[in-house]
C-alpha cells in the first residue's frame, strides 16, 4: 500500500536524515518505526504525507507517486497524531473532531453521527464529552480525542509520531490497549514512531529498526526477539534465543476450560518459547495442556508484554 523506493533525504550541509530506503507497508498493517535519536524514523514518517520533501527516490501510495496527488487530497486521506496533541482550546470536543469532515463538506447529521461513533469507540460517552472543552479532559482523554480526530474523515492511513510518550505509564498502557482494540475494529494502515521497545513489541505487526538513517532490520516482534540480524539489533531489542523463560511463566491460569472452546490447537506445557511465539503469530490465544488437561491459556499481547519487560530488565527475573 505504501512503498518506499530508494528514498533519501539529504540536507544542504551534505548530511543524510535517511539514505536509500526500500520497504513496503501492507494494507491494514500496524507498522512500527523505532531506533535511537537521529535514526531517521520521524523523517521517514513525515515524508509519507509530504511534511518533509524527499531528495531522491519515490514514495508510492496505491501505486501512485505521492508527488502526483493533490496535497489536500493526500493529507485528507492520512490521519496524523502527534505527541503534542494540538486540540483547539476554544472549540468543543465535537468541534475538534469535526474539523476534517467539515473540510470534506460532510452534512451536519453525518458529522454528528461520526463524532458520537468515535467518542464511543474510545470509551467516552458522547453525551458527557461532546460539548466539553479540551481543558476539562485529562491528558489521556485529550490524547484519545487526538486519535479519533485523526480518524474522523475515515482516512485509510494513520501516522502516529510518538503519540503516547508524554503520558504517565498507566495512561500510556491504557491508550496502547485502546489503540489495539480500535485497530482490530477498523483495520487502518498505521505507521507508528516510538523510541520504546516495549511499546513496539506490543503494538507492531512488523517493526522496522533504524540506525543513522538506514534500515537495519524489518521483522515481526517474534523474529526480532529470536533472530536479530546483528549485534546492534541484539543489544537494542534483546535476543529471544537466550531468554531463560519457561512456558509456565507465561500462562494465564483458568479454573476450567469451557466445553464450548476447542482445544484442537492446544500447545504442550513442554513447548519452547520459539514454538509458542510461532503459534501466536496466527492467533490471539492458545490453550495449554499438561497431562492431557487444559491448565490455562497463553495470550499474544500478554506474552509480548512479558518479553518486553524481560528484555528491558536485561534478562533478570520477571517481577
Image (cartoon, helix red, strand yellow):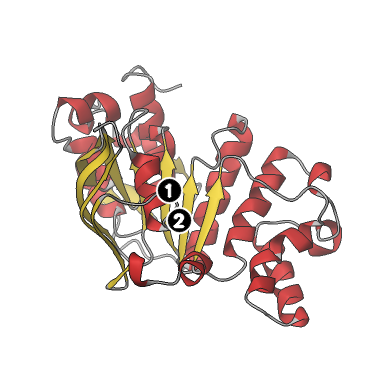
- Tell me the quarter of the picture where residue 121 sits: bottom right
Q: In the image shown, does 187 or 79 lie closer to the viewer?
A: 79
- Residue 206 place in picture, x, y as percent: 30, 50
Task: Please tell me whether mark 2 sits on a helix, a strand or a loop.
Answer: loop
User: Residue sitting at 46 percent across and 66 percent down?
Assistant: 71
Residue at the disc numbered 1: 192
Q: Is residue 271 something that shows in the picture?
A: no
- Residue 195 place in picture, x, y as percent: 41, 33
Q: Is residue 15 left or right of residue 74?
A: left
Residue at the disc numbered 2: 257
Task: Please tell me whether mark 1 sits on a helix, a strand or a loop.
Answer: strand
User: Residue sitting at 31 percent across and 52 percent down?
Assistant: 280
Residue extending farthest left: 230
Q: In the image shown, does 306 or 202 lie closer to the viewer?
A: 202
Q: Is residue 152 something that shows in the picture?
A: yes
- Residue 292 place in picture, x, y as percent: 29, 51
- Tell me the quarter of the picture where residue 241 sits: top left
Image quadrant containing the N terminus: bottom left
User: Residue sitting at 40 percent across and 23 percent down?
Assistant: 318
Task: Mark 1: give few (<14), some (14-19) or many (20+) Cα within 10 Å.
Answer: many
Q: In the image shown, does 275 or 110 lie closer to the viewer?
A: 110
Q: In the rendered picture of this protein, how many numbered marks are placed on residues?
A: 2
Task: Mark 2: give few (<14), some (14-19) or many (20+) Cα within 10 Å.
Answer: some
- Residue 185 place in picture, x, y as percent: 52, 67
Amino acid at each position: 500500500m505504501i512503498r518506499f523506493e530508494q528514498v533519501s533525504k539529504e540536507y544542504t550541509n551534505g548530511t543524510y536524515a535517511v539514505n536509500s530506503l526500500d520497504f513496503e507497508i501492507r494494507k491494514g498493517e500496524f507498522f512500527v518505526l523505532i531506533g535511537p535519536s537521529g535514526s531517521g524514523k520521524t523523517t521517514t514518517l513525515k515524508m509519507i504525507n509530504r511534511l518533509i520533501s524527499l531528495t531522491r527516490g519515490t514514495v508510492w501510495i496505491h501505486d501512485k507517486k505521492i508527488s502526483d496527488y493533490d496535497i489536500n487530497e493526500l493529507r485528507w486521506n492520512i490521519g496524523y497524531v502527534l505527541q503534542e496533541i494540538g486540540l483547539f482550546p476554544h472549540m468543543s470536543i465535537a468541534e475538534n473532531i469535526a474539523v476534517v469532515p467539515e473540510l470534506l463538506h460532510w452534512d451536519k447529521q453525518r458529522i454528528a453521527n461520526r463524532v458520537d461513533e468515535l467518542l464511543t469507540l474510545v470509551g467516552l460517552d458522547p453525551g458527557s464529552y461532546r460539548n466539553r472543552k479540551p481543558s476539562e479532559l485529562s491528558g489521556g482523554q485529550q490524547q484519545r480525542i487526538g486519535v479519533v480526530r485523526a480518524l474522523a474523515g475515515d482516512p485509510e492511513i494513520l501516522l502516529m509520531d510518538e503519540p503516547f510518550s508524554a503520558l504517565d505509564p498507566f495512561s500510556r498502557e491504557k491508550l496502547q490497549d485502546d489503540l489495539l482494540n480500535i485497530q482490530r475494529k477498523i483495520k487502518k494502515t498505521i505507521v507508528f514512531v516510538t523510541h520504546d521497545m516495549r511499546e513496539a513489541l506490543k503494538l507492531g505487526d512488523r517493526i522496522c529498526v533504524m540506525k543513522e538513517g538506514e534500515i537495519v532490520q524489518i521483522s515481526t516482534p517474534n523474529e526480532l526477539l529470536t533472530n536479530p540480524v546483528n549485534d546492534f539489533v541484539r543489544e537494542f531489542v534483546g535476543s529471544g534465543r537466550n531468554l531463560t523463560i519457561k512456558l509456565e511463566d507465561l500462562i494465564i491460569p483458568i479454573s476450567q476450560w469451557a466445553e464450548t472452546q476447542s482445544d484442537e490447537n492446544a500447545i504442550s506445557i513442554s513447548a519452547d518459547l520459539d514454538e509458542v511465539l510461532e503459534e501466536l503469530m496466527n492467533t490471539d490465544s492458545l490453550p495449554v495442556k499438561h497431562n492431557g488437561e487444559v491448565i490455562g491459556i497463553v495470550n499474544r499481547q500478554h506474552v509480548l508484554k512479558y518479553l518486553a519487560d524481560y528484555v528491558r530488565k536485561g534478562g533478570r527475573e520477571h517481577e
